[in-house]
Image (cartoon, helix red, strand yellow):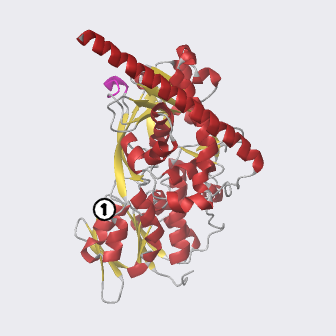
Amino acid sequence: MKSRKSKNVAIVGSGAAGMAALWALKSHSPHQVDLYEADSRLGGHTNTVRFKKGKEHTYVDTGFIVLNTATYPNFISFLNEINIPTQKSEMTFSVSRNWGLFEWAGNSLQTVFAQRYNLFSWQMWRMLFDIVRFNVFALDVLRSDHASRIDEVSVGEYLDEEGYSTFFRESYLIPMTAAIWSTSPHKCSLEFPIITLVLFMWNHHLIDTISQRPEWRTLKYRAQSYIEAMMANFLSNRVHLSTPIRSLTNDLSGRVSLITAHGVKRTYDHVILATHALQALSIISPSCTDKEYNILSQFETSRNTAFLHSDTALMPRNRKTWSSWNYQTTRHATQVSLTYNSNILQGIPASKYGDVLVTLNPLHPPDSATIQGVYSYLHPLLTIGAMKAQSRLSEIQGTRGISYAGAWTKFGFHEDAFTSGFKVAVEQLGANLPFEVADSEFSRGKVPDLTWPVVLPRLCLQGLHLVLTWVEWTFATFLSVRNNGGKSAMMN
């Protein structure tokens, strides 16, 4: 832990990481802090807006919406410290492909087979078998004897190597991955690390079928309530909104000089860049070292557009499958398209406010008469290159009086952003928090070793997989021979 001698500190960026660092330093350290934000508001993805229905109105979160009791320990500790209440939420997921030709949801057996003809679909039953098989075998990538050789394997490569069906890939795993990380299906398949996906699913109890899943929560008075609470006693002259930082350099004494987009220069003892990695790289570019460039340049982002609206054409056609998260795709989709049902997620009564929906990258624009807001968000892309760079971030953290924080330093979630902000404040600037900063990477604990009671079902599944593969190969061969025979007969 660093010295607690008072310093002048600047935080660039007021997203979750910047707000975490600000709270830690202003409330639990002797330092003087200035906050710089390029936007006209604080919060980044913490963006609560008003939704109107006739003369009534309510408030809706359009970026960060939910948390859970298992993998958000530091954010929950923070909320408890500032007395921000939460309420129960519900996390369910649906998939709608090709304008509703295929739809299902994992809420119950009724929603799995919401389209009754899928009871007679070989592809559907094969997908369900592959879900069970994935839940049993995917944990192998987290076991020590596998992890060292699979950390550079993408989701698509893993599915190909293990013989999972195309239908499982396109109707279950890729939609779930794309939805969780707001990433294009193509990126998920080619670049997303399988080890990251499996670790997330393990921590969230998504990769087994019988254990208790964590409870999902949403902020009772919406996400903006924590911003308002923590800023209540912060000096307004230390908050610089609409003030992008153009560049950063060190002076001869080693202090850090910030230059704003307006040409104003201010000098600090320490600067926290709580921005996306490439934004941080752009800011430090005038004095960037080779090591800083090599690490920060490995991180990428994707830009996603969110519409607040009430157009149910962007929900599944079969109302039985309506869920908290509703993934839509077509054969030619290049971006993730996902509708958050705020009625379910945030307990907003449809009887009073109608359908309250937030859609990322809709397949078609919502009915213009239903749109109440459009927002743009950058999300970190967790590529294999980014995961490697994360392991090297400590090499540049705190050097030259500069620290880095953001969701991109871990798994891309609100908890990761908060944790990174807390860690910088504690490890680089000596903040003394009223709780210990937890590491939630294995919040559920380590994956258990294989035992004989587990091995037997694995052998049965492997045998059944071989049989199914043989049946599919035989059927495909029969069709090929029949089709070729028919063509030969026509030619004769």
Residue 241's spot in the image, x, y percent?
A: 35, 59
x and y, in percent, of residue 223 in the image: 52, 47
Q: Mark 1 points at which residue?
A: 243
Quarter of the rendering containing residue 272: bottom left
User: For the residue labelled by badge 1, is the local secondary structure a helix, a strand or a loop?
Assistant: loop
Residue 327 lies, with reference to residue 428, above or below; the image says above
Disc 1 residue crowd, few under 14, some 14–19, many 20+, Cα 10 Å: some
What's drawn in magenta, residue-wise?
365-370
Identify the residue at image location x=27%, y=71%: 285
Q: In this view, does 305 lie above or below 330?
A: below
Percent x, y for residue 131? Answer: 58, 36
Q: In which quarter of the image is residue 268?
A: bottom left
- Quadrant showing the N terminus: bottom right
Decide whether residue 412 is among the magenta residues: no
Q: Is residue 461 visible?
A: yes
Q: In this view, does 209 lie to the left or right of 169?
A: right
Q: Answer yes or no: is residue 352 visible.
A: no
The residue type indicated by label 1 comes to Thr
Quarter of the picture holding the C terminus:
top left
Task: State the residue lying farthest toward the front.
Answer: 492
